[in-house]
Amino acid sequence: MGIIAFLYGLIFGSFYNVVIYRIPADKSIAKGRSMCGSCNHTLAAKDLVPVLSWVFLKARCRYCGSKISMRYPIIELVTGLLFYLAYASSGSIWEFLFYASLWSMLLITAMIDYDEMIISDAVLLVFTAVGLVSILGMKAGLLTRVYGLAFGFGFYFAIYYVAKLIYKKEAFGFGDVMLMGALGIFMGFRDTVLTSILSFYVALIIIVIMKIFGKKTGLRQEIPFGPYICIAAFLVSLYGDEIVNLYLNLFM
């Protein structure tokens, strides 16, 4: 069953590539055939087989020869691995759907924010809707989701407001505030608190690594914060109990 989950993940990953490209461009994800971004030639089914088409075409468009980014098969493989991990981490179909949908939304949100520095309202709407539906099949009840929403939105809104007062401009995106609210509905109170805190440690670690490898970063440079939130949420969804136990062992 694990391999089936992985294969389904590859297929969904191919669709997520479409979502990541089309939503910021304000294009429909339901209408219109996939086409080459260089020559606009409509792609045939044999051009759209996840990962394999990219390999057999040697990362080139069949029609114009332009290079196809390695990111497409990477997104497909990552989604396949996430679906496999969701299967391996789940004890029921509801848990599988919960993890697969949460991690899928995190991947899509992180990539769009990385590319365009925006948190898509459309993605947030789906994020929130799926989070509400997940209440039906998961142990975490409605109350902890409400607390998670309140904390996630409130904590990040306070940061957004204070940063705006200090820098006299929007120094922290309001999309990040909305994202944490949506995550609160998905994750509940405890995991939302952990994600809110861990996101800053993830950002610090990645920025330090970027500086080590010579990439310029600074307080005045705009950077997308959504990917850090998404990485933190992924880690907390997998290792929330271990993170709490580590904290208690270190400081209690």
Image (cartoon, helix red, strand yellow):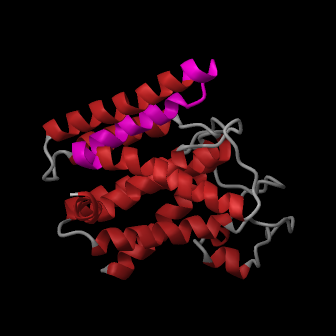
> Is residue 233 shown left or right of residue 90?
right
Q: Quadrant of the C terminus?
A: bottom left
- Looking at the image, the residue that sits furthest to the front is 251
Residue at 51 percent across and 32 percent down: it is 175
- Prevailing SS of the magenta stretch: helix
> Residue 6 location in percent, x, y?
42, 75
Residue 201 versus residue 181 in the image, above or below: below
Residue 111 is inside the magenta segment: no
Residue at 25 percent across and 40 percent down: it is 132
Front in this rendered view, residue 144 or 35: 144
Which contiguous range is marked in magenta? 164-191
Residue 187 is inside the magenta segment: yes
Q: Quadrant of the N terminus?
A: bottom left
Residue at 17 percent across and 40 percent down: it is 144
> Is residue 111 shown left or right of residue 251?
right
> Residue 98 location in percent, x, y?
28, 56
> Residue 118 location in percent, x, y?
59, 37
| Quarter of image, res 38 | bottom right
Count of labels in the image: 0
> Residue 220 location in percent, x, y?
70, 35
Residue 161 versus residue 226 in the image, above or below: above
